[in-house]
Amino acid sequence: EDQVTQSPEALRLQEGESSSLNCSYTVSGLRGLFWYRQDPGKGPEFLFTLYSAGEEKEKERLKATLTKKESFLHITAPKPEDSATYLCAVQAGGTASKLTFGTGTRLQVTL
Amino acid sequence: DTEVTQTPKHLVMGMTNKKSLKCEQHMGHRAMYWYKQKAKKPPELMFVYSYEKLSINESVPSRFSPECPNSSLLNLHLHALQPEDSALYLCASSHPAQETQYFGPGTRLLVL
């Protein structure tokens, strides 16, 4: 059974204090790993798709990396507007279209 | 443009009511999804339509009835819901070849 574990559950950072969120996964044949950002009461906003170990993608203050067992979302010099829940999801080969989500990391960035 | 729209934004219904949630996308995606999300939990897949045909039903109770009238529209018909069905209902779509799912803003449903 595919499994996704995110850590930490919650993270509080001061503005400018860089950190990383972790997503560990167990999947039979990774088809893709996805990062989403979700604000309270809203739908998840797509951030990145990673397909193979060693792949990296960047967008503004965010950088996602992938190994064979985990993915990291690095946040550099965060701002209060980066506060949100960050969700990781995996898609396995053979389970077309089905995403397995982690429980998310709630990030709060304070001034 | 990666926009998925959902209506209504909020819905309050009694347990004997019949209502429908609507979802629309104009990205040419041929796969569309319904998810249910409870507070502080990740989205849970309910249904998947691929090329307007139901391909996945995650053992969802029959009081939820999906419909895909065409490649751009997805409906979720609700009947005789229970208070525990109160949640954020999310629609998503994807291009089958790319698989990245794009989510709509959701419908906040409250069942009284």
Image (cartoon, coloured by chain):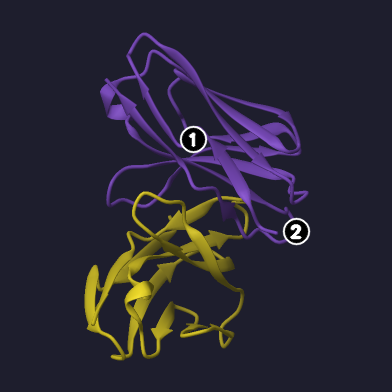
**Quadrant into which the N terminus of chain A falls:** bottom left
Residue, x 62% and y 60% (percent of image)?
B100
Marking on residue B97: 2
Reading the image, the residue beneath label 1 is: B58
Q: Position of residue A89 (x, y in %)?
A: 47, 62
Specify the quadrant of the image occupied by residue A71.
bottom left
Q: Is residue A49 left or right of residue B88?
A: right
Q: Which mark is residue A39?
A: none
Read off the chain for label 1.
B
Q: Residue B106 location, x and y as percent?
A: 47, 43
Judging depth in this view, the residue of B64 and A11 nearest the camera is A11
Q: Which chain is yellow?
A: A
- Secondary structure of the residue carrying tag 1 is loop
Are labels 1 and 2 assigned to the same chain? Answer: yes
Q: Which chain is purple?
A: B
The answer to whether A66 is drawn above or below residue A105 in the figure is: below
Nearest the viewer among B33 and B112 is B112
Q: Chain of mark 2?
A: B
Quarter of the rendering occupied by the C terminus of chain A: bottom left
Label 1 – label 2 distance at C-alpha: 22 Å
Question: Where B101 sits versus A88, above or below?
Answer: above
The residue most toward the top is B16
B11 over B38 or under it: above or below: above
Instruction: Name the amino acid type tagged 2.
Output: Ala
Task: From the top left corner, tell me how far across and down residue A10 is, in percent.
Answer: 23, 70
In the displayed structure, does residue A83 sit left or right of residue B23?
left
Residue A81 appears at what percent x and percent y? Answer: 37, 73
Measuring 29% from the left and 71% from the top, which residue is drawn there?
Answer: A107
